[in-house]
């Protein structure tokens, strides 16, 4: 199955016997309730809403980053209410160039599901084609589906794994260049990046129209950054394990794979001694520039 689906193709399928389940993943970090408000104002007909912080993340702790991976049993129960099972065809979309839909895609793939697609261009592409919308929330039927997500299908690494293999692995920082260089840090307590990491901003995987670049251009983007071929020793991170999923998804479009560091920079910061840039012994260290 192609990981992407166009707005016109999705509209066609929604009027066929092969109707997929659509999940609206819109979210704004600066206004956590905005996504649901936007969903209730207008969404793709039949779509259900999933919330980054309530559904696609566990509560933040001292370590694990700002958006830890959710409990997969809880996520299974949440999504089963939408009538989903392990063979369901699911289409995901947001209004943020795939940032939050890619997180949902990664979680569902990690949980063992196969029939997952992103709406290419997201909500904006749907609206641009003047396709139908509806408002309000969908009726939820408890135990409507039978979904059992079993994590383990996508490669994952954590803080200690990076400390143990830092010199051997290819680390990719997906944040904006200013945050990578340490010139600005609007969210996390420390500016900079994991030593040895290369910068590949996630937004560069998409064109100005918010749609993913072709596999050929994505391969060229990777090569132009001077990166080696991706595999499980390629570790991708961002601020909290969300937008890094866009780079993982972009690699999937080229047929490649990479490991995700779910806690990402916000988790790494929590291991820096006293939030000191120098660190000590085996504690996390920080690089700038």
Image (cartoon, rainbow, N blue to C red):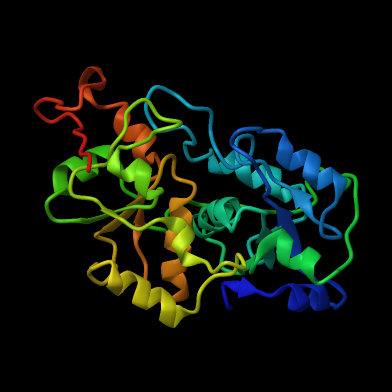
For the residue pair 25 and 184, the one nearer the viewer reads as 184
Residue 266 percent across, percent down from the top left: 38, 33
In the rendered structure, the answer to whether residue 141 lies left or right of residue 3 reads right
User: In the depicted view, which residue is nearer to us: 201 or 257?
Assistant: 201
Q: Residue at x 76, y 40 (%)?
A: 36
- Above or below, 52 against 24 in this view is above
Q: Position of residue 137 (x, y in %)?
A: 87, 44
Q: Nearer the viewer, residue 93 or 276?
A: 276
| Residue at x-position 69% and y-position 49% | 79
Quarter of the picture containing the C terminus is: top left
Judge left or right: residue 232 versus residue 257: left
- Residue displayed at 85% across by 51% down: 42
Q: Quadrant of the N terminus?
A: bottom right
Q: Is residue 131 left or right of residue 183?
A: right
Image location (x, y in percent) of residue 37: 80, 39
Q: Is residue 5 above or below residue 39?
A: below
Tell me if I can see residue 280 in this picture.
Answer: yes
């Amino acid at each position: 199955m192609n990981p992407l689906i166009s707005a016109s193709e999705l509209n066609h399928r929604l009027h066929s016997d092969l109707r997929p389940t659509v999940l609206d993943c819109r979210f704004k970090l600066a206004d956590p309730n905005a996504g649901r408000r936007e969903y209730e104002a207008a969404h793709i007909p039949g779509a259900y809403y999933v919330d980054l912080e309530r559904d696609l993340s566990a509560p933040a702790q001292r370590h694990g980053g700002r958006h830890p991976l959710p409990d997969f049993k809880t996520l299974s129960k949440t999504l089963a209410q939408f009538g989903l099972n392990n063979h369901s065809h699911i289409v995901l979309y947001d209004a943020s160039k795939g940032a939050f839909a890619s997180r949902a895609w990664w979680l569902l793939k990690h949980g063992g599901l196969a029939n997952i697609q992103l709406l290419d261009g997201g909500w904006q592409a749907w609206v641009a084609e003047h396709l139908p919308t509806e408002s309000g929330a969908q009726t939820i039927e408890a135990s409507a589906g039978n979904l059992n997500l079993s994590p383990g299908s996508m490669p994952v690494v954590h803080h200690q794994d990076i400390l143990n293999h830092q010199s051997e692995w290819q680390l990719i920082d997906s944040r904006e260049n200013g945050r990578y260089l340490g010139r600005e840090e609007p969210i996390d307590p420390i500016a900079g990046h994991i030593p040895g990491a290369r910068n590949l901003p996630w937004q560069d995987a998409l064109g100005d129209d918010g749609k993913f670049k072709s596999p050929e251009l994505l391969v060229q983007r990777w090569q132009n950054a001077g990166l080696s071929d991706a595999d499980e020793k390629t570790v991708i991170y961002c601020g909290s394990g969300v937008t890094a999923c866009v780079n993982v998804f972009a690699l999937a479009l080229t047929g490649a794979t990479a490991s995700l560091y779910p806690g990402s920079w916000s988790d790494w910061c929590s291991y820096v001694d006293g939030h000191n840039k120098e660190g000590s012994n085996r504690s996390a260290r920080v690089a700038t520039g």
